Amino acid sequence: MTFNLSGYHIAFKDRVIGSTKVVSHFGQYDVNDVIYNENTSQFLGVTGHGDFIEYKYYHKKLAQAYADLQYSFPQSEINITSYTRDYNKMVVNVSSIHNQDEFYFYDAKKFEIQKIAEAFPKVSEIIKSIAIQKIEYKAQDGTLIDSYFTTPAIAKGKEKPPLIVLPHGGPRSRDTIAFDWMRQFYLVNGYAVFQPNFRGSTGRGKEFRDAGDGEWGRLMQQDVDDGVDELIKQGLVDANRICVVGASYGGYVALYAATTNYKRYRCAVSVAGVSDLDDLFYHAKEQKQFVEYWEDSLGKRTEQSTLKAYSPLFLVTENTAPILLLHGTEDTVVPIFQSTNMYKALKKVLPEQSELIKLEGEDHWFSLGKSRKVFLQESLAFIQKHI
């Protein structure tokens, strides 16, 4: 019996793993997932998570269709979401910095493609001139970090643009050059956007991912700060107009930056962010899940002094930068009291510089369109006020 899994060919004999060999890879990035036909369970290929999710098909028809689509949509993330039994007709999702998550019907036999839907309406033709570049830099301890720096078209030829630092959630996740609705919004409003794949991010192997364990507020945070320093060193942004915006773990990064590195960051926006590390254990035990994950990611709950030392809730001072908090009332991943408690601490010290917006019926991912609209409107007004 043999299996193909995550880029390896694994041979089994008498229920014992025999020889293995690599059958697929994506250079410096990991194989991300296996592609199979959900109706027949036939193995079709693998995906890799690098600058965008790439697909490597071993099925002849899908491989040819994917190659044709790559030619039509260069530098884009192309996902064949569904297909007919003969693989001749398919629905395709295309996403890139200039393509706002669009859907196409593709007839591979006739080589005909037709746009059928878009996830987001185009807010401006400005997106055609937006420029994104991959920047690799070394953290203070020498670790190589990859990141994406995107500049707004309207900033060309003018003064250095203000910067939105947009760290991803997870932290076991990663940013790519595929369409990002938060990034795109700030870009069309004149802000440069920086997205670092700090240690702890996925896509670059288990060692790099696990290097983030126990580093909340420490090396993972330093990776973000080092990237901002690199942009300033290269003269790419206005060093005096920088704000951090993040969701979930990214919200934690924003809160920690505002409370500990207020000389660098003028403001912070936290969406469903974590303010108290110890309370994550309480919530996990209450939910009866993810306790082991949090022990790996944060450290043991018995290390109370360490957890408190890196919790923004206990780091608020009169120097803390202005903070906007947004949180859904139905968030089951990071409970809303993480934001309400943070707001209480801020109001005691900074009554005029902090805001809390509770979004009724909203979950952790801001799944409701009306909630995203509130977030975009309120965060932009808050940022414009402070930088």
Image (cartoon, helix red, strand yellow):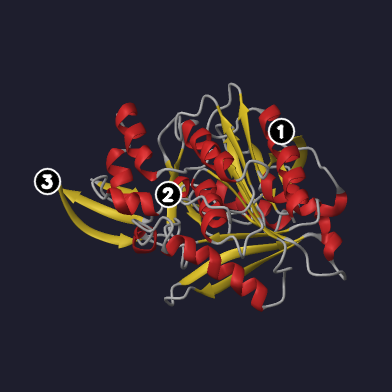
Q: Which residue is found at the position 45% from the left and 58% from the top?
A: 203
Rendered location of residue 81, percent (x, y): 59, 37
Q: Is residue 230 left or right of residue 341?
A: right
Q: Amino acid at mark 1?
A: Val
Q: CA distance from mark 1 to mark 2?
A: 27 Å
Q: Which mark is residue 311?
A: 2
Question: Mark 3 Cα within 10 Å, few/some/many (few <14, many 20+)?
Answer: few
The residue beneath circle 1 is: 374
In the rendered image, is residue 22 in sight?
A: yes
Sooner in the amino-acid sequence: mark 1 or mark 2: 2
In the rendered view, does 374 fall on the left or right side of 33? right
Q: Which residue is mark 3?
A: 14
Residue contact between numbered discs 1 and 2, judged by CB atoms under 8 Å = no
Residue 112 drawn at (x, y percent): 76, 43
Which residue is farthest top? 361
To which quarter of the image does residue 371 belong? top right
- From the image, which quarter does the C terminus lie in? bottom right
Q: Which amino acid type is shown beneath numbered disc 3?
A: Asp
Q: Position of residue 341 (x, y in %)?
A: 49, 35
Q: Is residue 329 left or right of residue 308?
A: right
Would you place residue 24 above or below residue 342 in this image?
below
Asked if 332 appears above or below 350 in the picture, the reply is above
* Mark 2 neighbour class, 10 Å CA radius: few under 14, some 14 to 19, many 20 or more: many
Q: What kind of element bears circle 1?
A: helix
Does residue 55 appear in the picture of this structure? no
The secondary element bearing badge 2 is classed as loop
Task: Say which of 79 and 321 sits in front.
Answer: 321
Q: Earlier in the sequence, mark 1 or mark 3?
A: 3
Quadrant housing residue 226: bottom right
First in residue order: circle 3 vs circle 2: 3
Mark 1 vs mark 3: in front: 1
Q: Secondary structure at mark 3?
A: loop
